[in-house]
Amino acid sequence: MDYYCIIYKPFNVLSQFTSGEGKQTLKDFFDVPTDVYAVGRLDYDSEGLLILTNDKKLNHQLLNPLFAHEREYWAQVEGEITDEAIHDLQMGVDITVEGKSYRTKKCKASLFKDAPLVPERNPPIRFRKNIATSWVKLLLTEGKNRQVRKMTAAVGYPTLRLIRYRIEKCSIESLNPGEMRILTQGEAYHFLFPGRNDSAKPSK
């Protein structure tokens, strides 16, 4: 039976159900069937949305870069980020991917006027009284390794906290770290493949 859910992966948790490193894994927080796995990954030190499923077609289509799924990230960065830096993020910046220089695709980037309401992180980021922070929203259609962190560092504002808030129409709205929401097959395909129902429809 196909299974679908969205979870809020906590900080410092591996995006898998086993670990040989003594680190916390998804198994410490989520009880799902044994054939269910995370689609893609979030870095150990990042938080937020992960899709869990045993549907191989959905897994393939979500990971296929040809579908260019929109992913929304919220990044708390060190310093008061400038309009120029936001513009540079939008136009694409040079980062290193697998030891080679890579120019990121154009994306949407914006500054939160007020810090978003997000759950407290455990442990919290280190507070520095004399150094301000900013929250930035990034909408990407690609997912290179540690891309958001590399992008903000490239414009001079290291990421302190990173949350993946949304993939297409699936979000962690109203979820706290360690919580999950089960979806029906119809909901999963509707939220993750909006406007592409014909090509993304699950086989019967």
Image: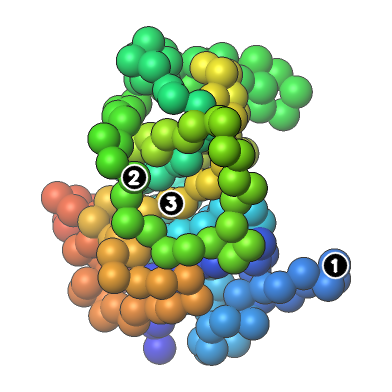
Q: Secondary structure at mark 3?
A: strand
Where does residue 17 sit, x and y in percent of width and height? 66, 75
Residue in the picture at 31% in, 31% down: 111
Residue farthest to the left, as pictured: 195
How far apart in space, not on screen, are marks 1 and 2 (Cα)?
Answer: 34 Å
Asked if 105 appears above or below 3 in the picture, the reply is: above
Drawn side of residue 94 relative to residue 59, left or right: right
Q: Which mark is residue 21?
A: 1
Q: Which mark is residue 164?
A: 3
Drawn side of residue 59 relative to residue 99, left or right: left
Question: How many badges with numbers are in the image?
Answer: 3
Residue in the picture at 33% in, 15% down: 83
Determine if residue 195 is in view.
Answer: yes
- Name which of mark 2 and mark 3 comes first in the sequence: 2
Q: Secondary structure at mark 2?
A: loop
Asked if 29 appears above or below 124 in the picture, the reply is: below
Q: Which mark is residue 115?
A: 2
Q: Are marks 2 and 3 in contact (CB under 8 Å)?
A: no
Residue in the picture at 54% in, 83% down: 30
Amino acid type of the residue that numbered disc 3 sits on in the rendered structure: Arg
Determine if residue 141 is in view.
Answer: no
Where does residue 7 sit, x and y in percent of width and height? 43, 71
What is the quadrant of the N terminus in the image? bottom left
Question: Is the residue marked by circle 1 packed among few (<14), some (14-19), or many (20+) residues within 10 Å?
Answer: few
Amino acid type of the residue that numbered disc 2 sits on in the rendered structure: Ala
